[in-house]
Amino acid sequence: MRAALRRSNHQFHQTLQPLNPAVVTPSRPDSHSRTMRDDPDPPFLSERRSQSKPGCPARTPDIEKKYVHRIYDAIAPHFSSTRFAKWPKVAAFLKSLPRGCLVLDAGCGNGKYLGLNPECCFIGCDISPPLIRICADKDHEVLVADAVNLPYRTGFGDAAISIAVLHHLSTEGRRRRAIEELVRVVKRGGLVLITVWAVEQEDKSLVSKWTPLVDKFAEEWIGPGSPRCRSPSSLSLESIPEMDSAASTENLALGEGLGGFGGGKGGKDQQEYFVPWHLPYHRAEIGGTSRGALESGLAKRDEKKRAVVYNRYYHVFEEGELERLVSDMDNVAVVDRFFDKSNWCIILEKTG
Amino acid sequence: MRLLTHNMLSSNIKGVANGFPLRIVAEKVIEKPVEMNHDFLKNMFAKLDWKAFVDASRSLGYVELPDEADASMLESSEFLNKFHHALLELHLEEGALVCPETGRKFPVNKGIPNMLLHEDEV
């Protein structure tokens, strides 16, 4: 049985299309796989994935290794030093849990939510060893593990949270699998809180600083072989515009006629982005990670800002997308869903 | 790594049918005192695989836990103290966790287990 969806906390009022599968066009990367668990890849990934292991969402695609895992490893201390504000909604969820709960945080980052309810016990995991090291130094109980493939027994946790994690997964199959894992590892009746970045950002100027990932980029960056030699006119990583408006025309041009991601700069259908992270020179270990990243082209310099710029991969979620991902899970009820500070959030209950 | 965590961890290597419990190779064990939370202990008692827990505690050199336990023992403060200590205060600081089926070793360094799989294990 699926509990009725409560919208009481749904504070986001904007002229968004309501979730309606009938209006989802086939060109959207994920729409076709709504009911097809085994064919989760957006078009730009299918070629690559068919060369590795098709139909295995647990396997990490190169785009995530390169533009998520390596980035967080490289920026971990700086990232952590900027990540101390706790979202009130997450805090409220954790504080609402009964005394004596075991809470599992999958993708805990620098561990800012671990221990937030001192009456509960927390175990965190993250795929980034440097971030987990930071958690351990704060005496949190943590391990290095992949949220898409949790090395946990089934039903051991009382509650689980996934805060700002799913938007780093590059296929619908992997996003769904991560949710299935969260549900699997909690007991029946256990709650799962998931938050993800929304397409509908409250600060529109933020989105203009992101680089939309259109098919052509993706093909070049994650495709087999040299990432930059597919076509002479292609943009190399160094030339990917990060925020200047002059470059957006170029993006637009690239997006045209490619379909798939809808082209365009930050258009309504655009959900795949590179989001810059500025690592100030004084924070960058120029002799270490950042130097390597600069040499390999993973990062670039912004002399004006005196920072090393890394691009992180994001799949931002549209309204109703989280619900859609769980719609065919028969042991899950949606207890609540809401929009909070440019994030879509959902609370699930494991019902079976 | 606490024994609480050890009791939850399971090898998820592709093809492994029963990855629990992971065998512990202990090189360094430390103790960190924490406050007792009775509700948590009661809650976890119902979930723990007791045998795996006792075996794990012994592999860390702690031999105070009884082979078998039932919920009535939670009334005894002596039992609770031992249970609490083994579950939350003992830490495997250096060593490894070994998959019971494949023998694959997951390293534990500075108290952190690394459970990441290699590409061909997924």
Image (spheres, rainbow, N blue to C red):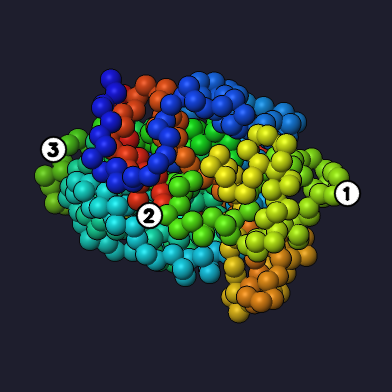
Spatial CA distance of label 2 from label 1 is 41 Å
Spatial CA distance of label 2 from label 3 is 47 Å
User: Which image quarter is the C terminus of chain A in?
Assistant: top left
| Residue on which disc 1 sits | A232
In the image as oriented, which residue stretches furthest toward the bottom? Answer: A282
Is residue A7 among the parts visible in the rendering? Answer: yes
Give the residue type that dot 3 points to.
Answer: Ser
Q: Which chain carries label 3?
A: B
Q: Which chain carries label 1?
A: A
Q: Which residue is rendered at x = 43% and y = 26% of the image? A: A20
Rendered location of residue A330, percent (x, y): 37, 21
Is residue B19 among the parts visible in the rendering? Answer: no
Spatial CA distance of label 3 from label 1 is 75 Å
Rendered location of residue A322, percent (x, y): 42, 36
Q: Which residue is rendered at x = 65% and y = 64% of the image? A: A244
Classed neighbour count for the residue bearing mark 2: other residues with Cα under 10 Å, few (<14), some (14–19), many (≥20): some
**Image depth: mark 3 or mark 1 in front:** 1
Residue B42 is tagged as none
**Image depth: mark 2 or mark 3 in front:** 2
Residue B20 placement, left or right of A217: left
Residue A341 is tagged as 2
